[in-house]
Image (tube, rainbow, N blue to C red):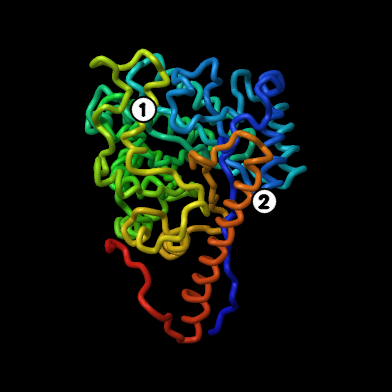
Amino acid sequence: MPVDFEPRFMKVGILTAALQELTPREVRDQDPDRAIEEWLEFAAEIGADSIQLSAALHPSESDVPAEAMLDPVANTLDLRDTFDRSRADRVVAAVGDTGVEIADIGYFDNMLHSDPALRRKKHDFMLRVFDAAVLLGCPAVCGFVGRNAERSLEENLQDFEESFIPLLQEAQARGLSYRIEQCPMPGWTLDDAFLNNLGYTPNAWLTLYRICERHGVGDQLRIHYDPSHAILMGQDTRSIFQWLRDEDVPFLVGGFHVKGQVIDPRGLTAWGYGGQTLERGDWVGGRPSPDPADHANAWKKQTSFAEHELPGTARHDPLAYLQNRSVDWLDHQLAARELLGLDVTETPLIVEHEYPPARIQNRELLKPILEGSIAFTRRIDEAAACMFALQNEVLPSQGIPVQGIGRQAYRS
């Protein structure tokens, strides 16, 4: 029976860390929810359907100085004071006025920090994020697992079971899921460790999921897939999604960050995928530098051979796509539809802006850059949706074969 052509599109959003101080600090510290209102207005101006609301410890409370970060975070959601129903109602009213949804809340921190006091502080903050998500009607919180740097990755599985499972139980009690972003976070430590976030790769997700299943919180653990980190690990999206399907867990992917990575062949030749290990500048005189600004040099484990891409800002490079050295955005969106069994119209596609030369913290200068990237992301998704509907629904319903072979998993 012939079917109609009915492509289904994803909602395109943006992480509010793209412009950290959209509302000046002297204004927002006195009236914190104004920062969310103004970001919703800005998101509407640049053509976004939603925002991923960035939460973080206030700069006065954070244990990591901003100058030590590769991509400074934003506390658009300010939780120094209780986020109660009256605050939530104000934000929900702004959602209604702008027509921009809040897809979820993102709090990206090390939830397995080796310092017990800091770990407790971060967990307490995460619980406040959970409570805010409930009041705002968000289905999920996005973040990291992290790593206890004083223990091996194998030992961290015990940390995960003892310390992270209780967080997922709290999420379950609130009807939330926790979406892990898979960045390995190589610059989090000043040693040679590249893998500082336990949920960094598909087999690790499956290992964590099985632990969660044993404790009855498997439905709480999901992945907020970011293809830039796959490129960093020498992987490609189609192969990752195929692997999840092969292992019968394609449902683990619950959302997407739209951020790319461009591999520098010269830097890769010099250092390989482990990145710069010597003379980075984070150590001075044989010991960690006392200057926090020097600690940002630990990120040369990544930046010596790769640079983040804001979607649409990197040149079209078919050879790089085939070598897994840049994100093939069209195949990314096709593979998601073909292999994951998504409820496409309810799956967030969140643009994350971390392309260093374009991280302009000026509203008027940044606005056309974000507009362009969101428009690019939307058109790529629309193109993929149309191809999928035509090739997987319309043509088969009339017995017409699809031409060619296309990109294949496990092959480059």
The quadrant the C terminus occupies is bottom left
Q: How many badges with numbers are in the image?
A: 2
Could you tell whether 360 is left or right of 364 in the image?
A: left
In this view, 161 is above or below 102: above
Residue 381's image quarter?
bottom right
Could you tell whether 358 is left or right of 167 in the image?
A: right
Question: Residue 263 — which label?
Answer: none
Q: Residue at x 61, y 42 (%)?
A: 51
* Amino acid at the residue labelled 1: Asn
Q: Which residue is mark 1?
A: 297
* Amino acid at the residue labelled 2: Gly
Q: Residue at x 36, y 16 (%)?
A: 116
Question: Residue 47 — which label?
Answer: 2
Could you give the CA–CA distance between mark 2 and mark 1, rounded to whole angstroms? 35 Å
In this view, 399 is above or below 297: below
Crowding around mark 1 (Cα neighbors within 10 Å: few <14, some 14 to 19, many 20+) is: many
- Nearer to me, 49 or 91: 49
Where residue 306 appears, as percent x and y from the top left, is: 36, 44
Visible residue check, residue 300: yes
Could you tell whether 163 is left or right of 151 in the image?
A: right
Where residue 80 appears, as percent x and y from the top left, is: 60, 19
SS state under label 1: helix
Q: Nearer the viewer, mark 2 or mark 1?
A: 1
Earlier along the polypeptide chain: callout 2 or callout 1? Answer: 2
SS state under label 2: loop
Where residue 68 appears, as percent x and y from the top left, is: 43, 24
Where residue 215 appears, as percent x and y from the top left, is: 35, 36
Crowding around mark 2 (Cα neighbors within 10 Å: few <14, some 14 to 19, many 20+) is: some
Q: Residue at x 49, y 23 (%)?
A: 66
